[in-house]
Each structure stands twice: as structure tokens, then as C-alpha cells.
């Protein structure tokens, strides 16, 4: 892609998100979301492959449906209450419609079906943008909205953690596994949103760091399925040793960073008297943990002298920068000891 066009599209992505962040009026927020969608579409379709074009079309249709619902709900709210302010959603009908529209935008279950299909059709770089940056603007709106319908949020959160764990079990494609992992993590964030928005933000930040690391590892190995992952030890042995730690951090195992948000969320849910919800969420984390363990097993426990399931790759020197990967991997593995300090910051 022409670097000038790429720069313009990335600028459009940044501008769309920033407009949504800064807006207090529904029309402006909707406009930011639309700019975001329109800027990423050429990036998704840049490889002229039928699968990429199909993924782009699916993404466009779902995002357009979500944006239309959002606009309709905000107009309905203005008609019922005379308010265009984002924080002035008082009527339950537009509030529920907007929550569902934003859930469709970020891919929360049961409105998640488009996400694995779309992510599977993209290259890893665009997939990384879709899994991280594209979640920010809708999340800013959900946080501002503070939806009044708490039952809806708990249902969305629990179904996302369960479906995110369940759906990834049978997958061999890494991008689909990451899509289901994304659905499960978003479920955790939505579960705790109404009780502690600060924990939701912390979980989002840690999810972004861990997903960034995972995508960069797969990109460095040029891996898109489990078989190619199994042959990556010949290319980058040190990275192959670190990758299971990154994956288990995504799964939420102590003593890795990913345990921190799960710990704080379960603690908060128990404080609020939602022990059954916390138990279900914790059990659903075991489902996710199974497929991260499966990836870890494929990477580190199937190496020589066992028979390889895939063909050994050419050991060509990689052109990818390793500094971002080194930084994000360190953060993904080592942040758990800072939990008391972070908790103190959250409560202050």
C-alpha cells in the first residue's frame, strides 16, 4: 500500500477514535465511530484475496447495522427526553438499544458471530488493530453511558465469557482462537463495569498489552495455525520459550500479569453479593485456559525429537522490530507484583 494512503488511513483511525473520546453529543460520537469504520475498511481489503474481501464485507455490514441502531436509539432518546447528551440517557428503551448496538460493535456474545469470521480473513497486523484499537471508541461510550440495565450487562458478560471459552476449544486457526479470547476478555470487562469502571479500564489496558504481545509473537513466526506454531522453535528458540508464558498470562494464571484483572474482578463481584456470577465466570476461565494450554503444548512440548506435524520453515531473518515485542512481553509476564499499588490507585 502507498505510504501516503496508509498514513491517511491511520490518521483517520486515530481521529475517529479521538472524536468519539472527546464527544458529549450522540451525533458527534456516532460520526467518530463511522470515521473509524471507514478508515479500517481499506486496510482490511488491501490484500486482494477473496477471504479478505469477504471479511471486509461482513465487518462493514455488522458495523453499519450497529451504527444505524445507535443513531436510531439516540434520536429516539432525543424525541422522548429532549436530550442529546451522552450522559443523559435516562429512558430504559434507548439505553438498552444503545448498549446492544455497542455490544455488536465490539463483538460481545450473543452478538459475536461476526468477529471470528472477520478476524480469520485478515492478516495479523490488521487483526491486531481490529482486536485492540477498534475496541477503544465503543468502550469509551459504554463507560460514559453507565447503562441502567444491570441485568443486561451481567447476561452479556456471562454469555461472552462462556461462549468465548467454549468457541475456542475446537479451533486450529490462531486468529479464530484470538477472536474467541477477545470475546471472553470483553465479557470479564462488561461483568464488572457497573460496579467498578476503574477495574474495567485496568482490564482493558492489560488485555491490550497481552493481545499485542500474542499477535507480535505469531507475526514474528508467520504462524496462522497450530501446525506452523509447532515448528516455530527452529526459528526463534527464546521466543518459543517465552510464548507459553504470554499465552498463560492471557489465560489468567498466577504469577503472570493476566491473573491481576481476573482476581480484582472476582473480588469485586463477591463484594457485590454476586458469588454465583463470580463462580460461573471463574469456571468459564478454565475453558479459555484449555485452549491456551493447547497452544503452549503445540509450541514447546512437540519439539525434537518428536515427529513434527508441519513442514519445517525456512529460517529467513525477520524484518520485524523486536523492541515493541520485548517491552510488551515484559509487561505481559511481570506486572502481577504491582497489584497492591494498582489497587491503591484504583480506590483513591
Image: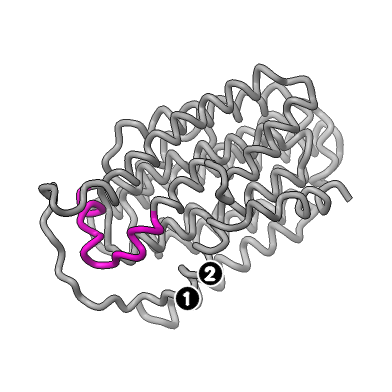
Whole-number angstrom distance, CA of label 1 to CA of label 2: 6 Å
Give how far across and how far down residue 304 sits, in percent: 16, 54
Quarter-of-image position of residue 311? bottom left
Q: How many marks?
A: 2
For residue 231: magenta?
yes
Q: Residue at x 54, y 57 (%)?
A: 332
On the rendered structure, is 206 left or right of 306? right
Give how far across and how far down residue 124 sits, in percent: 36, 59
Give how far across and how far down residue 335 sits, in percent: 62, 56
Q: Are marks 1 and 2 in contact (CB under 8 Å)?
A: yes
Range of magenta residues: 227-243
Coloration of the structure image: one colour
Give how far across and how far down residue 336 sits, in percent: 64, 51
Using the image, tell me which numbered label, if any, was put on residue 323: 1
For residue 102: magenta?
no
In this view of the protein, can residue 294 be seen by the observer? yes
Q: Could you say whether the residue bearing mark 2 is in a helix, strand or loop?
A: helix
Mark 2 highlights which residue?
A: 327
Few, some or many residues within 10 Å of mark 1 (<14, 14–19, 20+):
few
In the displayed structure, 330 sits above or below 180; it is below
- State the residue lying farthest toward the right: 348
On the rendered structure, is 140 left or right of 177? right
On the rendered structure, is 249 left or right of 147? left
Nearer-the-camera pick, 345 or 41 = 345
Majority secondary structure of magenta residues: helix
Q: Could you say whether the residue bearing mark 1 is in a helix, strand or loop?
A: helix
Amino acid at each position: 500500500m502507498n505510504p501516503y494512503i496508509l498514513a491517511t488511513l491511520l490518521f483517520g483511525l486515530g481521529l475517529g477514535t479521538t472524536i468519539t473520546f472527546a464527544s458529549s453529543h450522540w451525533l458527534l460520537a456516532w460520526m467518530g465511530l463511522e470515521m473509524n469504520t471507514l478508515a479500517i475498511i481499506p486496510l482490511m481489503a488491501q490484500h486482494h484475496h477473496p477471504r479478505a474481501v469477504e471479511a471486509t464485507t461482513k465487518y462493514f455490514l455488522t458495523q453499519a447495522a450497529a451504527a444505524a441502531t445507535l443513531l436510531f436509539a439516540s434520536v429516539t432518546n432525543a424525541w422522548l427526553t429532549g436530550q442529546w447528551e451522552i450522559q443523559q440517557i435516562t429512558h430504559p428503551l434507548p439505553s438498552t438499544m444503545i448498549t446492544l448496538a455497542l455490544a455488536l460493535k465490539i463483538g460481545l456474545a450473543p452478538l459475536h458471530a461476526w468477529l471470528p469470521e472477520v478476524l480469520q480473513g485478515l492478516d495479523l497486523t490488521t487483526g491486531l488493530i481490529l482486536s485492540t484499537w477498534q475496541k477503544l471508541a465503543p468502550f469509551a461510550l459504554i463507560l460514559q453511558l453507565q447503562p441502567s440495565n444491570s441485568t443486561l450487562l451481567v447476561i452479556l458478560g456471562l454469555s461472552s465469557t462462556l461462549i468465548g471459552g467454549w468457541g475456542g476449544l475446537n479451533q486450529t486457526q490462531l486468529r479464530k482462537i484470538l477472536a474467541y479470547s477477545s470475546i471472553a476478555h470483553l465479557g470479564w470487562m462488561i461483568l464488572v463495569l457497573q460496579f467498578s469502571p476503574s477495574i474495567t479500564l485496568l482490564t482493558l489496558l492489560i488485555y491490550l498489552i497481552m493481545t499485542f504481545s500474542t499477535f507480535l509473537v505469531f507475526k514474528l513466526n508467520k504462524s496462522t495455525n497450530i501446525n506452523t506454531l509447532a515448528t516455530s522453535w527452529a526459528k526463534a528458540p527464546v521466543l518459543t520459550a517465552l510464548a507459553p508464558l504470554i499465552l498463560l498470562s492471557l489465560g489468567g494464571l498466577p504469577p503472570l500479569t493476566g491473573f491481576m484483572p481476573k482476581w480484582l474482578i472476582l473480588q469485586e463481584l463477591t463484594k457485590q453479593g454476586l458469588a454465583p456470577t463470580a463462580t460461573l465466570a471463574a469456571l468459564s476461565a478454565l475453558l479459555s485456559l484449555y485452549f491456551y494450554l493447547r497452544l503452549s503444548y503445540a509450541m514447546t512440548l512437540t519439539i525434537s525429537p518428536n515427529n513434527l506435524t508441519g513442514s519445517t520453515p525456512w529460517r529467513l531473518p525477520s524484518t520485524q522490530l523486536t523492541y515493541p515485542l520485548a517491552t510488551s512481553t515484559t509487561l505481559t509476564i511481570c506486572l502481577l507484583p504491582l497489584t497492591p499499588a494498582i489497587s491503591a490507585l484504583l480506590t483513591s
